């Protein structure tokens, strides 16, 4: 492009020297045609060129200014058009940096009102960009929320919303995952020539039928490079942090052993009394199978850490089990090196932090430095990492050409309490509930976007937006086409971010608890109200709390919920804390609002198609033949090939 600019500039200067009007006019008009998409006053400029081409008309209009000086003026106008053209090009092909926290509460950040946790680097994004105050996760659980984020679609459309009790992947050797036919933004940006990387947590599956088909792996979904965990961070992954499974597993194992024991004794008794003959060989086989199954289960759950908590680079395990020592520094180093390798080409970086999901951890430089225990230490270490990423963008002069986004996959997990009684969950501010619920505390998440010179700094947007909106936003910015063969539920955020429109395109948003439609949000185009209805709500335990402390998370069915007929109705514009449900007596349009929302639900339901349930029990269970192991089972799947050399210098602030 700059060669073309130089060519036309040279033409203009030559014509100024020779004062040959027609070659000069040809050059100017060619330049106008070249830059016409970015020259707002091109019609006026063309008139000026035409006037200049006619000597008498030019003298009459320009007077003593003279055609030479006017030629210089036109040259400057063309040069400005060239600059505008280059700016337009950079706006349409930005680098994209997506920073995703895990289980971070909206109230944990200074830019959202926290005054006791230090998050200067994340707050810097708010100061230099846009703060979304009603930014919503498509699901209050990790796996479905991340599926929606990558695809721009409700997780129910891709089979990533569970009908069973468990709504996320827990084992590395499960067969479920993000289907290969789903189109992720990483696939589309890769097709446009972007270098793509995912660093950190994946949590969307790995293998389908064998332990090396990698059908659900990040590299099968458009990422060139992967460094991180394919499953998730869990208490079971860190010694001394307790267990998510063991208590429940022990209970079920005891029940299973009791059932099998009663069965075996009953068979032996009926055989002894002669009611019918049971071959001793059959009893022996049944006993052997039972013992093998119990041994496998016991082995798996007592070796959970080695089998499920490991670090990968691309398709290779490099650390099994995972070590938490300097883990955030290692993730940050990988992200920095990716930027450095690709600073001359457009890139997509998804840095998906393990912070602040339990098991909590922080490096030595951050431990004990916050006012909120290990949780606060982890938040402040993550903020340090964000600062490192912003600094490397600045060092390579990439800030103005990079869109940076920071968010969380869902709200804080308020039920996280350590065995010693320390709070290991975050703070959702004024909002009710938390992770696993569709109360605002479970789905209203930080939403910060920075792009200097393109997005106005220090602005706030209060309209409902979704993490599904990132998909169409960055796909369009990269010049790719949105898929036309499927419904995309997200909307391009750029018109809203740049102030070209004042309302979000989300008139309705549908909030699922696993695969069950739990709530609907309606933001009418002619009103400031944001109506939200609940068809059912979780039963909190204790009742006067805002969480399900007895079960660690809230569930979506049976005795765990209460159905509401008519549905609960709130106006979030007046009651963001969802304290007092409206009634026909307190809201005159009560039934009218419910009627409109029900019509939207009917239309939405008709748009759904039957897809394979990726979170069925069959797809969730551990399958030994899918298990990855970097050594042998007799060596307890142990290896450590990850290097901590050249870690960035850490200052805790």
Image (cartoon, rainbow, N blue to C red):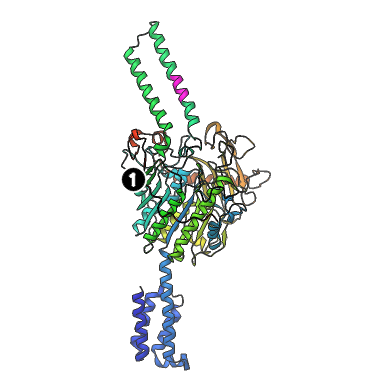
Q: Position of residue 488 (x, y in %)?
A: 43, 51
Q: Nearer the viewer, residue 530 or 208?
A: 208
* Residue at 64 percent of width and 43 percent of height: 581
Q: Where are the magenta residues, as a range?
A: 253-259
Q: Nearer the viewer, residue 40 or 287?
A: 287
Q: Nearer the viewer, residue 180 or 131?
A: 131
Q: Position of residue 438 (x, y in %)?
A: 55, 43
Residue at the disc numbered 1: 316
Q: Residue furthest right?
A: 585
- Does residue 384 show up magenta in the picture? no
Provide the major secondary structure of the magenta segment.
helix
388 is higher (above) or lower (below) than 437? below
- Whether residue 46 sits left or right of residue 425 in the image: it is left
* Residue at 48 percent of width and 63 percent of height: 451
Q: Secondary structure at mark 1?
A: strand
Q: Is residue 244 visible?
A: yes
**Residue count near mark 1 (Cα–Cα under 10 Å), binned few <14, some 14–19, many ≥20:** few
- Whether residue 80 sits left or right of residue 212 in the image: it is right
């Amino acid at each position: 492009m700059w060669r073309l600019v130089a060519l036309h500039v040279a033409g203009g200067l030559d014509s100024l020297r020779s004062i040959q009007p027609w070659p000069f006019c040809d050059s100017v008009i060619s330049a106008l045609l070249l830059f016409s998409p970015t020259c707002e006053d091109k019609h006026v400029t063309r008139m000026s060129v035409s006037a200049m081409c006619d000597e008498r008309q030019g003298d009459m209009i320009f007077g003593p200014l003279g055609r030479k000086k006017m030629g210089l003026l036109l040259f400057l106008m063309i040069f400005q058009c060239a600059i505008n053209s280059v700016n337009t090009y950079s706006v349409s092909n930005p680098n994209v940096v997506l920073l995703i926290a895990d289980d971070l509460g909206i109230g944990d950040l200074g830019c959202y009102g926290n005054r006791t946790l230090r998050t200067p680097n994340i707050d810097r994004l708010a100061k230099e960009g846009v703060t979304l105050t009603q930014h919503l996760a498509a699901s209050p659980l990790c796996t479905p929320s991340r599926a929606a984020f990558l695809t721009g679609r409700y997780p129910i459309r891709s089979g990533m919303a569970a009908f069973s009790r468990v709504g996320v992947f827990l084992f590395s050797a499960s067969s479920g995952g993000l289907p290969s036919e789903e189109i992720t933004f990483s696939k589309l940006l890769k097709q446009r020539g972007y270098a793509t990387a995912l660093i950190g947590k994946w949590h969307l599956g790995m293998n389908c039928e064998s332990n090396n088909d990698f059908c659900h792996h990040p590299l099968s979904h458009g990422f060139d490079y992967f460094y991180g965990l394919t499953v998730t961070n869990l208490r079971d992954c860190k010694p001394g942090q307790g267990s998510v499974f063991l208590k429940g597993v022990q209970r079920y194992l005891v029940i299973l052993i009791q059932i099998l024991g009663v069965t075996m004794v009953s068979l032996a008794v009926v055989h002894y009394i002669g009611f019918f003959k049971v071959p001793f060989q059959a009893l022996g086989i049944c006993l052997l199978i039972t013992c093998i199954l119990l041994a496998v289960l016991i082995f798996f759950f007592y070796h959970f850490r080695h089998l499920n908590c490991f670090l990968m680079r691309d398709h290779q395990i490099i650390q099994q089990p995972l070590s938490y020592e300097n883990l955030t520094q290692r993730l940050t180093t990988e992200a920095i090196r990716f930027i450095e390798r690709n600073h001359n080409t457009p890139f997509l970086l998804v840095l998906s932090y393990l912070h602040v999901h339990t098991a909590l951890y922080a490096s030595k430089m951050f431990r004990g430095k916050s006012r909120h225990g290990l949780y606060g230490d982890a938040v402040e270490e993550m903020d340090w990492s964000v600062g490192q990423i912003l600094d490397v963008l600045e060092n390579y002069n990439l800030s103005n050409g990079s869109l940076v986004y920071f968010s969380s996959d869902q709200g804080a997990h308020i039920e996280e309490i350590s065995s010693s009684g320390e709070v290991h969950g975050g703070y959702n501010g004024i909002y009710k509930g938390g992770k696993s619920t569709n109360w605002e505390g479970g789905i209203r998440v930080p939403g910060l976007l920075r792009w200097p010179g393109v997005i106005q700094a220090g602005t706030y947007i209060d309209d409902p937006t979704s993490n599904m909106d990132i998909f169409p936003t960055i796909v369009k910015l990269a010049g790719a086409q949105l898929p036309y063969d499927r419904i995309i539920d997200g909307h391009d955020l750029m018109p809203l971010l740049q102030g070209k429109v004042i309302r979000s395109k989300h008139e309705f948003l549908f909030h699922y608890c696993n695969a069950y439609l739990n709530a609907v949000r309606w933001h009418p185009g002619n009103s400031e109200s944001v109506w939200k209805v609940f068809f059912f709500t979780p039963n909190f335990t204790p009742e006067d709390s805002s969480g399900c402390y007895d079960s660690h998370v809230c569930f979506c069915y049976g005795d765990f919920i209460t159905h509401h007929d008519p549905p609960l109705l709130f106006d979030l514009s007046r009651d963001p804390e969802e304290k007092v449900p409206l009634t026909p007596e307190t809201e005159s349009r009560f039934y009218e609002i419910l009627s409109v929302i029900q019509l939207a639900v009917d239309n939405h339901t008709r748009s759904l198609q039957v897809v394979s349930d990726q979170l069925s029990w069959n797809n969730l269970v551990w399958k030994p033949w899918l298990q990855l192991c970097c050594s042998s089972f007799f060596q307890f799947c142990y290896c450590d090939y990850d290097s901590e050399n050249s870690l960035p210098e850490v200052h805790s602030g």
